[in-house]
Image (cartoon, grey):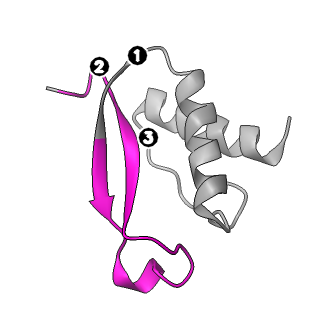
Amino acid sequence: MTKLESIAGAFRAARLAASPLPAYPAGAVPATLAEAYAIQRAAIAAWPDRVAGWKVAAIAPQWRDAYPGERVYGRCLRRRCS
């Protein structure tokens, strides 16, 4: 199992259990948005629901140097979108 798969699995397991994680899996947040989106794609691919929409948010000022860009996006799953 790769580090990416391990992180995605930890997020997926915590969400299925409705349980918070004590810290970011593997100890450090992704170094790039591409890595973060890859983790997100891996977690969603194994999720027992389908994508129903998208959510978009601005990148907080304190993260803009590390994650260049103005916004991030994520999938909204059918059971969570209304």
State which quarter of the image contains the C terminus: top left
Q: CA distance from mark 3 to mark 1?
A: 21 Å
Q: Quadrant of residue 49?
A: top left
Residue 79, how many percent across, how many down? 27, 19
Does the magenta-highlighted stretch encompass residue 72?
yes
Question: Which comes before the other along the chain, label 3 or label 2?
Answer: 3
Q: Taking 33 as reference, is 79 above or below it?
A: above
Residue drawn at x 84%, y 41% as measured from the top left = 2
Q: Which residue is mark 2?
A: 78
Residue at the outermost left position: 82
Q: Which residues are magenta?
A: 55-81
Residue 25 seen by the camera: yes
**Residue contact between numbered discs 1 and 2, judged by CB atoms under 8 Å:** yes
Magenta span includes 8: no
Determine whether 78 is above or below 56 in the image: above
Give percent across and percent down for residue 7. 67, 45
Q: Of marks 3 and 1, which one's residue comes earlier in the chain?
A: 3
Q: Position of residue 57 (x, y in %)?
A: 29, 59
State the mark number for residue 50.
Answer: 1
- Amino acid under disc 1: Arg
Q: Which residue is mark 3?
A: 19
- Amino acid type at image mark 3: Ser
Q: Do the CB atoms of the residues marked 3 and 2 lie less than 8 Å apart?
A: no
Q: Residue at x 63, y 44 (%)?
A: 39
Identify which residue is drawn at 40% across, 43% down: 74
